[in-house]
Image (cartoon, rainbow, N blue to C red):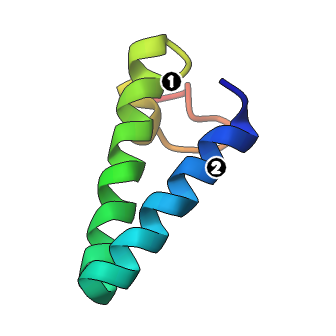
Amino acid sequence: MSMALIGLVAGLALGFAGYFGGFGALVLVAALGAAGFLAGRIADGDLEPGDFFRPRGRDSGRR
């Protein structure tokens, strides 16, 4: 599935949530979509959970 098609589906889902459920539903759908995207990236092996907790300094390996 191409990234353009995934973006289209995500935009449609957010549009429907915003129209029918209001701003709160739009924010909820966006947050759950982001969580699902991260879970999918972790499941595919493209991202590791530890990547969120490591410092970003140049000498982060020196502790």
Please tell me whether residue 38 is drawn above or below residue 29 in the rendered image. Answer: above
Labelled disc at residue 7: 2
Q: Estimate how packed mark 2 is, as few (under 14), some (14 to 19) or many (20 or more) residues with alpha carbons within 10 Å.
A: few
Residue sitting at the far top? 45
Please tell me whether residue 39 is drawn above or below residue 42 in the rendered image: below
Compared to residue 13, the image places residue 17 above or below, namely below
- Type of amino acid at the residue the image marks with label 2: Gly
Quarter of the C terminus within the rendering: top left
Q: Check residue 47 in the rendering and tell me which mark sits there, or answer none.
A: 1
Residue ID at (57%, 34%)? 60
> Image point 34% across, 71% down: which residue?
17
Name the residue at 47% across, 32% down: 51
Q: For the residue marked with disc 1, what is the amino acid?
A: Leu
Q: Where is residue 10 in the image (x, y as percent from the top left)?
A: 52, 53
In front here: 44 or 17?
Answer: 17
* Front position among marks 2 and 1: 2
First in sequence: mark 2 or mark 1?
2
Q: Taking 5 as reference, is 53 left or right?
A: left
Under circle 1, the secondary element is loop
Residue 37 position within the rendered picture, expressed as x and y whole percent measured from the top left = 44, 38
Q: Is mark 2 on a helix, strand or loop?
A: helix
Circle 1: is it few (<14), some (14-19), or many (20+) Cα within 10 Å?
some
Quarter of the rendering containing residue 18: bottom left
Which of the pair 21/45 is nearer the observer? Answer: 21
